[in-house]
Image (cartoon, rainbow, N blue to C red):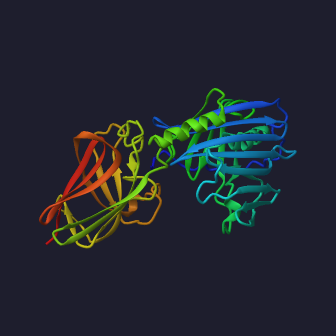
Amino acid sequence: MYTRSSRRLSLGVVAVLSAASPLASQTPVLRTYVTTLGKDTLGVEQYTQSGNIITGDLITRGGGTVINHYVITLGPNGGPARLELTQRKVDGSIPPNAPNSVTVTYGPDTMTTVIMRDSAITRTLAVKDAFPVFGNSMAAYEIFLSRLRATKADSGAVAALGVNAGATALRAPPPPYAVKFFGHDSARVWNQGFAQHVRVDQNGRVLGLTGRATTLKIEIRPTQMVGIGATARAFAASDAAGKTVAAGSARDSVRAAVGGARIAVDYFRPLTRGREVFKNGVLGDTIWRTGANNATQFKTDADLVFGGRTLPAGTYTLWTHVPPDNSRYELIFNKQIGQWGTDYHADQNMLTVPLTVSRLPAPVDAFTILVDAGPGQGVLLLQWAGTQLSVPFAVRQ
């Protein structure tokens, strides 16, 4: 998704995270969080902290139930010193393509990752004051938020890296997370230009997170203590009953021949997940990638005519424009291709055409693009929830 109000925080000064975190000095705590997307429960996390040791389990439900067990050791300054992570299915087996274990050691200027498969794969990444992030773990967020809170600064930048980052062929770390506190109970965490809204207490402990302004749209909130084993077994039983939570937006393609023109559309198909997807734009966005993940790609090997205007043969990305009041819909053909679906540049627009709105006889859960082909002409159809958006076209003779 793309939201015009989303932006990267510009920081004049990067706070030095050198003050001791309050996490390690507090009495033992137990935290439980649930992650949801629409009506779907994507995961549950529960962890305890005693002294400088955080031990937790993060259950994820993306195409199958997996228990991510982790132990994080904090250093004297409250930052991470070591992280140990294992991933297991409910029966104790290792998920496909997952390693036996991952261990990360954090130095002042390096991050060393050891991935254990049949043998150990060790890589070291040069990065200063790195912090772990994995899945939607709030324990990981609390580490860097509490340490930044302890500096008394109201903003800063954090080298937050996935636990596998040190084992990849990175020449340099990715851009840091930008953080800004608002009062005593709110923070914004910018990741790749998108703001996550986090509720925190005065020590930086997380009281909830919303990703409505990001591409993920998730909600994370505290919940009552659960039995991790029993919860994972219940999720696995739901999986076995055919009620698996989809891992994400499936990739799909459309191929059509219209009056000698060959048309191809490649896109990802987000699910409604019980949400009102056409509200305040599309999922709150005024410019939508017309799908999910990568920008949707449209290719034609012949010139097409939309509403008397010609789209030259070529490859484009598709974007849907809709104001917050949903008063009109427009389809944009953009000349930039191959980009992620949040990388929209209006100066690359080739053609903008109005879309006709109609109701579907039955709701469509997975966003669907179709080409209704006729002799020398056709209709491009976008279907999702109970709404259909359409635009006719003809092959230029």
Q: Position of residue 149 (x, y in %)?
A: 75, 38
109 or 354, nearer to the observer? 109
Q: For the point 77% across and 57% down, which residue is it?
A: 128
- Examine the rendering and report whether any part of residue 137 can be seen: yes
Quadrant containing the C terminus is bottom left
Q: For the point 21% across and 54% down, which residue is it?
A: 391
Q: Position of residue 288 (x, y in %)?
A: 39, 50
Q: Residue furthest left?
A: 375
**In this rendering, is residue 39 above or below 65?**
above
**In this rendering, is residue 376 above or below 193?**
below
93 or 215, nearer to the observer? 93
- Name the quadrant containing residue 59: top right
248 or 347, nearer to the observer? 248
Q: Residue furthest right?
A: 76
- What is the total number of numbered labels drawn onto the structure image? 0
Q: Position of residue 246 (x, y in %)?
A: 46, 46
**In this rendering, is residue 378 above or below 312?**
above
- Examine the rendering and report whether any part of residue 208 can be seen: no
**In this rendering, is residue 146 above or below 305?**
above
- Name the quadrant containing residue 297: bottom left
Q: Is residue 21 left or right of residue 382?
A: right
Q: Position of residue 222 (x, y in %)?
A: 62, 30
36 or 59, nearer to the observer? 59
Q: Residue furthest top?
A: 224
Q: Is residue 55 left or right of residue 175?
A: right
Q: For the point 85% across and 45% down, which residue is it?
A: 77
